[in-house]
Amino acid sequence: MISLRNVTRTYGEGDAQVKALAGLNLDIELGQFVAIMGASGSGKSTAMNILGCLDTASSGTYSFNGVDITALTRDSRALLRRNYLGFVFQGFNLLARTTALENVELPLVYRGLSRSERHAKARLALEAVGLGDREEHRPGELSGGQQQRVAIARAIVSDPLILLADEPTGNLDSERSHDIMRLLRKLNRERGITVIMVTHEADMAEYADRIIRFADGKIAEDRQKVAA
Amino acid sequence: MLWESIKLALRSVRRNVLRSFLTLLGIVIGVAAVIALVTIGSGANQKISSDIAKLGSNMLMVRPGVQGPGPPGGSDARSFNERDIEALRSGVSDVRAIAPSSSKQANVVFDATSTDASITGADEAFFVAQDWSFIQGGAFNESDVRAASNVCVVGTTIVSTLLPNLEPIGQTIRVGEMPCTVVGVLGSKGQSAFGSDQDNLVVMPLRTFQRRIAGNTRIASIAVSANSPAAVKTAQDQITEVLRETRHIGENDPDDFSVRDLTQIAATMSSTTTIMTGLLGAVAAVSLLVGGIGIMNIMLVSVTERTREIGIRLAIGALASQVLTQFLVEAVVLCLLGGALGVALGLGLAGLASSLLDIPFAPDMKVLALAFGFSGLIGLVFGFFPARNAARLDPIEALRHE
């Protein structure tokens, strides 16, 4: 379980100070599929950055499986991301001029795996997202939906506990968006990967077990769906 | 991890071949200049020392008048005579040979062919003092010298111009107005340090030369060969002392002759080339510095261009130190490539120069390794600031970067 307690995050100084999070309390059980919604400026992206250990809270605590990780150093947070977290972004964020396989094995390079181990794991991940036949393609040679699948393969290649997806369907048409959501739900169901997703599309949020709506740096609504 | 970084660096060099090459040009030129200058410089030094060695080992040159370096001059100076030589032979110890000689340019004729050559009058010590070897026959002997016989020893140039396809020993050539019989052929010494052909000479007994060629009894120079490098200095002092006495030079009067140490001249000439090499090397070092700044500039551009990539790497768990290493390795690889190109170019230039200037091609492995290593060091120094910038990026900001 991960939990945020009284988390605030402020940017800037003095009069120009902006409060992105104003005392956020949030618990997410491992294995859940959570959708976070809200208007822009509601603090949902800030919450994602803190949950993803890319940013730290200005005050409050963050505990991960019972361990307080509020005040970790930059390198410790990097190691946490490396070992437990996977990221999927709206803009895919693949390395251009690098093949799908090389993109997917990138996190394993930092884990110090050998070339053959990396290849084997990256191939499995690409197969899991249905792109087993595209490993030598570069991002420019793939459609948006396929690029996002490569990004998902990269996120799951190191078997993370939590997959954080920031508007994963924001750049895709409706059909591809539903494909991606089905893939995320499948990974959640079959592998037990916790998925935390930010989206502004209500029909995409419906794939989740739980929908949290943000307003003014706090949770405005927290709806748990009955398991399908 | 390091190997991954090197592969990544090579890939990014390949992606921007032209840009990488232009960036490297400063390093290439700097390294090439250092290598070329040092190699040519040490070749020139080797040439000078071997030229000096050809003149004879541990040699002192005694000449009338006070002279600077260069060929002898000043006919007004009081030349040496037999008495001076006798005094030197009895008063100077620890020497191999004391060889008086005089020379003059004269015409040498055989059959219908004639040539100008340096005619030297000397005794048999001359061949010892100047380290001449014989490829045929041998030196004239003491009785030839005393009797002023009409015999001579010739250099290889004389043989090839006047006596081609002939057995030179026993032939009679005409030197000036005098016929003389060839008794020996000297081994070749090639060109002197001043560019003259040392093999274009005829050596005859000193008295024969004085009577038949020069028409006087002057002795223009005395070559003294010490037994060891250590004995050179003592010999120099003894020669000065003995000559001042026989030539009746007053206590407060200056010497009217000079005793020059050829090894000293060689050292002076070498140190001149060494200073030149050093100065030009400093210019080359400036070029390396400029090259380093070029590297820093391009690495800063590269870091900015790849901000998003850095963001991705940081997000998926790269440590700041790993990003730092990646960009440092890239700068070092870039510089080492430049260093390798520079070494190749420098050796090429030095090879070309040494064949044009007729000096030995003397590449020094230590200098090559040093220049190559130094170019890597430049990468490390000038790559550090951009790499640190990359490592300090905030992953969230970096991911947003367009």
Image: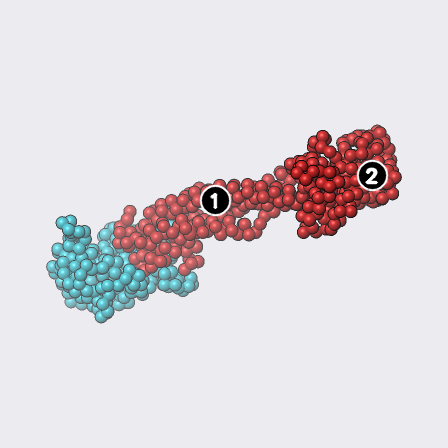
Chain colours: A cyan, B red
Q: Residue B275 vs residue B171: left or right?
A: left
Left or right? Give the position of B209 relative to A116. Answer: right
Q: Earlier in the sequence, mark 2 or mark 1?
A: 2
- Tell which residue pokes out farthest to the front in this image: B251
Residue toward you, B90 or B127: B90
- In this orientation, which residue lies closer to the viewer: B399 or B127? B127
- Tell me if residue B319 can be seen: yes
Residue at the image position 39 percent from the left and 56 percent from the top? B325
Q: Label 1, on which residue?
A: B285
Under tag 2, what secondary structure?
strand
- Where is B308 relative to A109, above or below? above
Say which amino acid is labelled 1: Ala
Q: Chain of mark 1?
A: B
Q: CA distance from mark 2 to mark 1?
A: 57 Å
Q: Residues within 10 Å of mark 2 (few under 14, many from 20)?
A: many
Instruction: Give me the residue at 73% from left, 41% from top.
Output: B245
- Where residue B306 appears, as percent x and y from the top left, is 34, 49
Give residue B205's mark.
2
Task: Out of B232 and B107, give the one closest to the viewer.
Answer: B232
Drawn side of residue B184 relative to residue A18, left or right: right
Q: Residue at x 64, y 36 (%)?
A: B68
